Amino acid sequence: MRQLSTYIGLIFILVTIQCSRKANDSPTTETIHSNLTATDTVKKQDNQDQKRNVILIVRDSTQYSKRFLAGLRDYGPGQKFELTDDEIVADGYRKTKIIQLIPKGKTVVLRGQKNNKKYELRLQRIDYTSISYEFLFTDKNGKLSEQGIGEIRSDFMLGSGMDEDDRGIGFGISCEYWTNDSRKMLSSIRLGVVDQKIVGRINGVEKDFESQEAPFLKSEQKPASLQ
């Protein structure tokens, strides 16, 4: 009888071990879902990395801002960019010129007045994608001034649109520069050409400098292409 009890006990232990192994080898629904989610996440990240596997071929990187070159890698419209002076070739066949309105080595001064407020913008070209600016604003409370850097966006080749002068006549925006700094009064500077002279409009982060408040700015200087 004692041998029979021992035999039955051994069988019970073996069955228990086997069931435990099966339970461990068979993943629960929660485990399966977790594994699939992890795999899908990895695949999605791989696809994103592959999508932005961008090639930059730059003849002289000092002629473009670091932010601009980084933007081409992050969100530029293409997978391969070749930069030579003011020309960009995307994916081997789409050619785009980086329009240069500001003559190299010169200061362009744009002025405008509206509602007893005076606006003056002094611009100098730094490289193919950047300008330095000095902005002067005068009203009944006095004068404010600001200096900074404006840079074109890395997807500028998708188009920059139209604007209007004080007469309501539309003109093309040749280039748009962004300050990329919320602490500045100006957020963007849009430049074009009217009557063979450089003109522009500004946007700002303060109420006085919103696009509908600021006047059309005019200069007496010709764009670089006409000099």
Image (cartoon, rainbow, N blue to C red):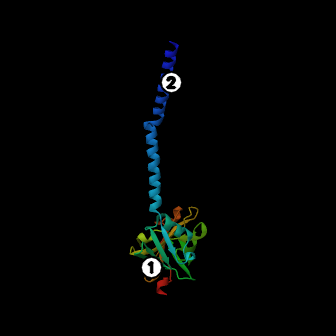
Q: Residue at x 50, y 22 (%)?
A: 10
Q: Nearer the viewer, residue 165 or 99?
A: 99
Tell which circle, 2 or 1, labels the residue nearer the N-terminal end.
Answer: 2
Q: Residue at x 44, y 41 (%)?
A: 32
- Relative to 90, does residue 31 appear above or below in the rendering? above
Q: Amino acid at mark 2?
A: Ile
Crowd class of label 2 (few under 14; some 14 to 19; many from 20; radius 10 Å): few
Q: Nearer the viewer, residue 138 or 196?
A: 196
Crowd class of label 1 (few under 14; some 14 to 19; many from 20; radius 10 Å): some
Q: Residue 91 location, x and y as percent?
A: 42, 72
Q: Residue 151 location, x and y as percent?
A: 53, 70
- Relative to 212, does residue 16 appear above or below in the rendering? above
Q: Amino acid at mark 1?
A: Val
Q: Which residue is mark 2?
A: 13
SS class, disc 1: strand
Q: Which residue is mark 1?
A: 193
Q: Residue 85 location, x and y as percent?
A: 51, 80
Q: Residue at x 48, y 34 (%)?
A: 24
Q: Nearer the viewer, residue 4 or 191?
A: 4
